[in-house]
Image (cartoon, grey):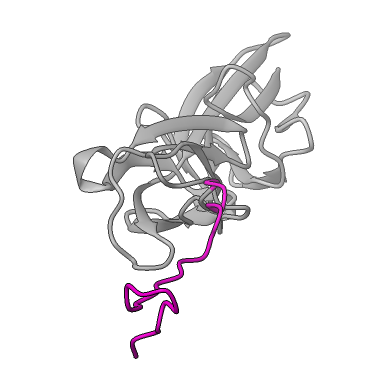
Amino acid sequence: GAIEIIVRENNNAKTPVENVTVSVKGDNSTETQNLKTDADGKTGLSDQPVDKYTVILDTTTLPSKYKLTGDTDASQKKDVNANGTTTYIFEVEYKTGNLEVVVKDATTGEIIPNADVTLVHKDTNTETQVNTGSTGTVTKENVPVGEYEVKVDTVPTGYEKPQTIPGVTAEEGKTITAEVKLPKKESTNPEPEKGAIEIIVRENNNAKTPVE
């Protein structure tokens, strides 16, 4: 029979994961065969004797951003029958961390409440919207690890969106802070017209004698 091994991400696209090492061993064999997944996240063996085969995924060879899903075992044992294909599927998901968003006045450093911010995960292009509320701070828990682009959607009255905002990288099991600094909006009021004031103190006579 044949053995097919698939390592993929647990998402709608079932994104394949390549270069992951798995070992294959039959109950009645003394030989362990080590295989590596290809660009399609697949590997396997053909023309194997009928037997029970254990496939073990080496989790140390997964990309660092991934872990096995909670219902996926690193070791799977199945029957391989004659003239058939037995498939072993290992599904992975992103490790997670927390991102804290803090919005401040770019000049004074004071906290600015009620700003709308979008976090864009660069790997998946997934967007997460948050509002900083009355405290000017919000924490988004259990977001996928990796780099994020930070965008400001709406700002409170008197401020404007910054031209650039530093990105932030979420790390497994940690809370990382994304600090957004908003510049104050420049005044658009026109300059008032100006005139002169002249003050004269003089005697009330024909000569209008000045008084100093």
Q: In the rendered image of this protein, does residue 140 appear above or below residue 206?
A: above
Quarter placement of the C terminus: bottom left
Magenta segment, principal secondary structure? loop
62 or 48: which is nearer to us? 62
Residue sitting at x 32%, y 40%: 140
118 or 23: which is nearer to us? 118
Describe residue 157's horizontal placement relative to residue 120 as left or right: left
The percent coordinates of residue 175 (x first, y second) are 32, 56
Q: Bounds of the magenta span?
A: 188-212
Q: In the rendered image of this protein, does residue 204 appear above or below residue 21?
A: below
Residue located farthest toward the bottom when viewing the structure as drawn: 212
Magenta stretch: includes residue 211: yes
Is residue 200 in sight in this rendering?
A: yes
Residue sitting at x 39%, y 53%: 172
Quarter placement of the N terminus: top right
Residue sitting at x 43%, y 44%: 95
Residue located farthest toward the front when viewing the structure as drawn: 206
The percent coordinates of residue 203 (x first, y second) are 32, 78
The percent coordinates of residue 50 (x first, y second) are 63, 20
